[in-house]
Structure formats: structure tokens, C-alpha cells
Image (tube, rainbow, N blue to C red):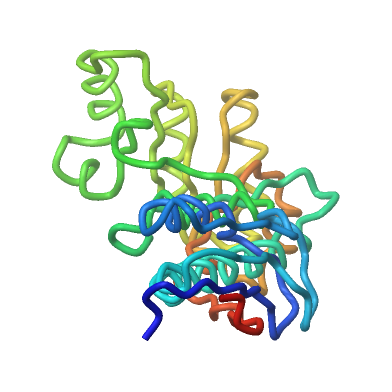
């Protein structure tokens, strides 16, 4: 039905939020038909309001229709993550505490979803297992304890790597700092427990990075007041709704 036809269209958002995914449209169209073009009206990471035009498309109609659903699905998903991240980052504004993502991402979309977190004002934790050595509860349970595990990793790492220890008790956290961990992930501690623990850990190693995880979004402000550096959450990726975007078609060109 569309062979030999040209078309022109635009994207519009039906809801307020933070846009993300526009950078994917041009390379996607280039794969389908290099004659197609896109003009972005909104940069990734910018806030948008319902009814706002996001980008304009022109070219062979078959390519525009072929790209429509894939491009919109990606952008709606990523814009939802960016929007949810921005809302949480706003809660932390002025506290000096950063919001980070986790490795709970959709298979195949990790790089894109982590990009969306950055567009929303968050920062990325590890992209993969090679970014840092992280000792979690399973490592500590089977390696002989915090000090033994940290020493083993330090002795065998093929390059200088940041070493993070996940601690579920105050004793584990203090052992991690004493063993020379670069960062301690404090998992499922209450704000009151962290307020008491953080000064002790700073006393042992002033430069150690302290991160809280297992934090519900409604608790962000309470955790930010404990003196930690970082809050990690999977909520923007695992719980965010898609932003409602639509592609609208302009009259026939040829």
C-alpha cells in the first residue's frame, strides 16, 4: 500500500514527563531507509508537557511506518524511566546525596535503561560485573567472611578495581571498612540505624563511600539525612509506567 509513497509525521506526548529516546530514532530509520530524516525538537532529558511535539519525521512512508512501533515502544519505556528518576532526584535536591540505579534491568535493554536514568538526573552504578568487584551476601557466606574475601579479591584482581562490600549488619559494615573496602553498600538498614552507624564508619575511614539500598521511594528524605553518599534503587526501572507518546501523520506528500 505504501510502495513509492512519501510521508511526513511527528511525535507528540499525551502526558507530562521527561523525554528520552529521541537519539534512537535516526539510527533506526537509517537502517530501514537512509532517505528518511528526523528533526528532534526536544533533547533527551528535557521536561515535556502534554500536547508538546517531540520530533518530526519525513521520508519513504514504508520506512516511517516500519519504525513507528519499535521506536515508540523504546522511547515510551525510556521516557517513563527518566520521568520516574527525575521525581526521585527532586526529592534529594539540596541534600548532596546522589541517586543511583541497580543492575535490575530488562534483558537486552541495560545500556538504554541506564541511559534513561542519567537523562532523569540519576547516576549509574555498575554497568556490568567488570566495572567493580562487589562482594555480596553469597560471597561472604562461602568465602570465610569479609576480611578473607576482601584480601582474596585484592590479591587476585587483574587490574586495580573498586571493591564494594554489601553489608547487612553493623559488624559486617565495620569489618568491610577495616578490611579496606572502597565502598560499603548498607542493605536494608533503617534510617535510625544508619544515623548511628555512619559516623562510626566515617571515623574508621573518612573517604569510604557509603551507599544505602533497599530504600522505598517514600523514605528517600529520611535516608538522605543520615549522612550517606548514595542511594541506589531499582524503582525507576522496575516500577515506572511508560510515558504516553503517539506518532501523528501529516497529509500525503506524494
**Count of numbered circles in the view:** 0
- Percent across and percent down for residue 92 are 76, 56
Query: Which residue is located at x 64 percent, y 24 percent?
Result: 206
Q: Is 150 on the left or on the right of 68, as rendered?
A: left
Of 151 and 68, nearer the camera is: 68
Q: Quadrant of the N terminus?
A: bottom left
| Occupied quadrant, residue 10 | bottom right
Judge whether 64 appears above or below 139 on screen: below
- Percent across and percent down for residue 164 are 41, 34
Quick one: which residue is furthest to the left in this view? 142
Query: Which residue is located at x 67 percent, y 74 percent?
Result: 218
- Percent across and percent down for residue 189 are 52, 59
Q: Is 137 on the left or on the right of 84, as rendered?
A: left
Of 72 and 64, nearer the camera is: 64
Q: Is residue 168 visible?
A: no
- Percent across and percent down for residue 158 are 24, 14
Judge whether 131 appears above or below 35 on screen: above
Q: Is residue 89 visible?
A: yes
Query: Which residue is located at x 24 percent, y 42 percent?
Result: 140
Amino acid at each position: 500500500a505504501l510502495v513509492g509513497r512519501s510521508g511526513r509525521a511527528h511525535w507528540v506526548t499525551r502526558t507530562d514527563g521527561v523525554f528520552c529516546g529521541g537519539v534512537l530514532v535516526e539510527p533506526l530509520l537509517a537502517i530501514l531507509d537512509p532517505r528518511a530524516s528526523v528533526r528532534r525538537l526536544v533533547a533527551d532529558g528535557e521536561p515535556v508537557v502534554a500536547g508538546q511535539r517531540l520530533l518530526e519525521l519525513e521520508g519513504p512512508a514504508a520506512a516511517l511506518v516500519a519504525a513507528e512501533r519499535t521506536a515508540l515502544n523504546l522511547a515510551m519505556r525510556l521516557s517513563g524511566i527518566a520521568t520516574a528518576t527525575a521525581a526521585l532526584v527532586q526529592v534529594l535536591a539540596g541534600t548532596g546525596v546522589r541517586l543511583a540505579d541497580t543492575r535490575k534491568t530488562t534483558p537486552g535493554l541495560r545500556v538504554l535503561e541506564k541511559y534513561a536514568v542519567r537523562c532523569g538526573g540519576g547516576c549509574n552504578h555498575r554497568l556490568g560485573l567488570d566495572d567493580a568487584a562487589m562482594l555480596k551476601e553469597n560471597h561472604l557466606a562461602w568465602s570465610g567472611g569479609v576480611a578473607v574475601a576482601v584480601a582474596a579479591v585484592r590479591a587476585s584482581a587483574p587490574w586495580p578495581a573498586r571493591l564494594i562490600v554489601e553489608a547487612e549488619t553493623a559488624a559486617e559494615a565495620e569489618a568491610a571498612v577495616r578490611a579496606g573496602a572502597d565502598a560499603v553498600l548498607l542493605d536494608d538498614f533503617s534510617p535510625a540505624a544508619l544515623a548511628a552507624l555512619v559516623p562510626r564508619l566515617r571515623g574508621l575511614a573518612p573517604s569510604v563511600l557509603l551507599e544505602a539500598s533497599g530504600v522505598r521511594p517514600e523514605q528517600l528524605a529520611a535516608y538522605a539525612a543520615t549522612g550517606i553518599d548514595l542511594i541506589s534503587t531499582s524503582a525507576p526501572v522496575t516500577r515506572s509506567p511508560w510515558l504516553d507518546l503517539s506518532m501523528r501523520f501529516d497529509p500525503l506528500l506524494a
